[in-house]
Image (cartoon, rainbow, N blue to C red):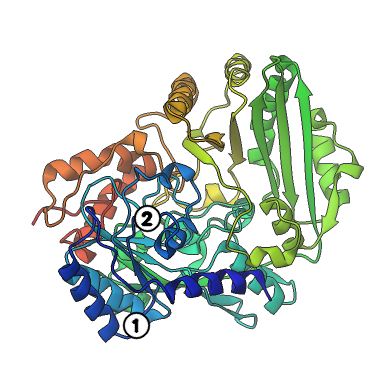
Amino acid sequence: MHSIVVALLFVLSLLSTAIQAHPSTSTPDSTSNTLLSSCLLSKGIKNFSYQSNSPSSPFNQLLTFSIQNLRYSLPSTPKPAIIIFPLFKYQLQQAILCLRQRSLTIRVRSGGHSYEGLSYTTSYHTPFGLIDLSNMNQVQVDPASTTAWVESGATLGEIYYNVAVKSNNTLGFTAGSCATVGSGGHISGGGFGLLSRKYGLAADNILDLIFIDPNGRIFNRSMMDEDVFWALRGGGGGSWGVVYAWKLQLIPVPNQVTWFTVSHSGPIKPLANLVHKWQFVAPNLPNEFYLSTTISGSEDGNGSVSFTGLYLGSKGSAFSILSDRYPELMISESNLEEMSWIDSVVQAAGLNSVSDLRNRSTNSKNFFKAKSDYVQTPIPKEGLIGAMKILTKEPSAYIICDPYGGAMARIGGRDLPFPHRAGNLFSIQYLIDWTKSEEGMADRYIAWLRDFYAYMGSFVSNNPRAAYVNYLDLDLGTNNWTVGRSSTVDDVNHASLWGDAYFLWNYDRLVKAKTKIDPENVFNNEQSIPPLPK
């Protein structure tokens, strides 16, 4: 039996015993639970579970199944009063209306990869309900029109698998490398990936969508305001309503692509020289070439730099390009491997086989904190040396640098909410992770990462210092919404702290779109877009 089927049967088997109220101090009272149950059941929705104080309850297993950052799985993290698993569009629509009827804040989870847990928790201390889309994961591929309709609960792995199989390995899609990421949240934030230098973001390749607004109304592109359609493709998740499904523009992929990973370790200075040259090479390679670098340090004072490459062509051509433009990499033809595009997806995701792409679960989870930056001017060698010396003080930390250029520079910065286009050489993702929850450990690791981020401030974009919304970072600022409170001018100005970082000049248009589609601010979170005051 396929692993994804096993995962969903696990969810449904728990739900079969979970439709009962487990009142606690942070959930609505039993009367509210009864009224909510009646609302859901009257609409044919039977897949839901109320909060329980028992760690072994079906509710807690259903909640933690998709939590990817263990920082938000601790007992102290606020939990939803109820988890609802709709099976199709009508149930999704009615779940929204039933939660609104009981005045519950709404969270929507497609894959559970929100870096700050915003899709399944809240810090507002107000009762909330979670709509989990994991059972809404259908992928319908039409090879003749090179398009696909994808439900928002489908993971990237499920999309890649179905597109490859149903097109006989002739089509692909441009999105991220982690197979268990939910498409709903990923596309909502833009969706950068290994094919983005050739084909742009996932959001750049959305032709249409089916959207459910806070009042339960259903729209496609032809029916909705153009500002709203624009906002849904890159304006971040959790602010607008719920996208039920996306229509994707699929892309042609060659029979064979070239994949490689090569690593260098040792003294910091020569490694810094290697990374310094990478800044000039990677953003200017042919559009078919993606070459990222990951940098870390070790306690012995040495560093490590690995390079991951994907080329949409033969290994002979890839070797010729690298030998000419980046001889310092000292790559040999034996480092390069030709394979199908779908096999390169498996490599990028760190999986063992194509069939693993259908598995929603991940073998390992940890606690982590992340931040991000954009680099517009090459970082001087001395700056890189300083950064790598800092990394040797904390082996649990590392940075990933993704090259831009190509299609990322050609697409206009106002075409979608995602503005980080021409002028950006590469993005930086800062990560630190740990495996145990010990008192004070999280605070120490997070403080360390913030200090490293502060050091990098003079080498990255500024006024504002930009960030990628899919690498959510609550350090940039937060809302503090309460149920029923209207937005104010101060709220709109305050939200620009992160709105400007994520969206730059597009923030004002996002506020305009929010005011059109959700003026009552039904869909909100700690970094959502606020509407203009009434």
Residue 146 relative to residue 326: left or right: left
Secondary structure, mark 2, is loop
Where does residue 495 sit, x and y in percent of width and height?
A: 24, 42
Q: CA distance from mark 1 to mark 2?
A: 22 Å
The residue indicated by pointer 1 is 90
Q: Is residue 380 visible?
A: yes
Foreground disc of the pair 1, 2: 2
Task: Pick the residue in front: 394 or 534.
Answer: 394
Q: Quadrant of the N terminus?
A: bottom right
Task: Pick the residue in front: 328 or 349.
Answer: 349
Residue 425 relative to residue 523: left or right: right
Q: Is residue 217 visible?
A: no
Secondary structure, mark 1, is helix
The residue indicated by pointer 2 is 120
Q: Which mark is residue 164?
A: none
Q: Quadrant of residue 227?
A: bottom left
- The amino acid type, in three-letter code, at marker 2 is Tyr
Badge 2, how many Cα within 10 Å: few under 14, some, many 20+? many
In terms of sequence position, does the residue under pointer 1 or pointer 2 come before the other? 1
Vertical comparison of 192 with 297: above or below: below
- The amino acid type, in three-letter code, at marker 1 is Tyr
Task: Pick the residue in front: 66 or 30.
Answer: 30
Vertical comparison of 289 with 209: above or below: above
Task: Pick the residue in front: 205 or 243.
Answer: 243
Q: Quadrant of residue 167?
A: bottom right
Q: How many marks?
A: 2
Where does residue 521 sit, x and y in percent of width and height?
A: 19, 58
Where does residue 321 sit, x and y in percent of width and height?
A: 81, 42
Q: Residue furthest left?
A: 534
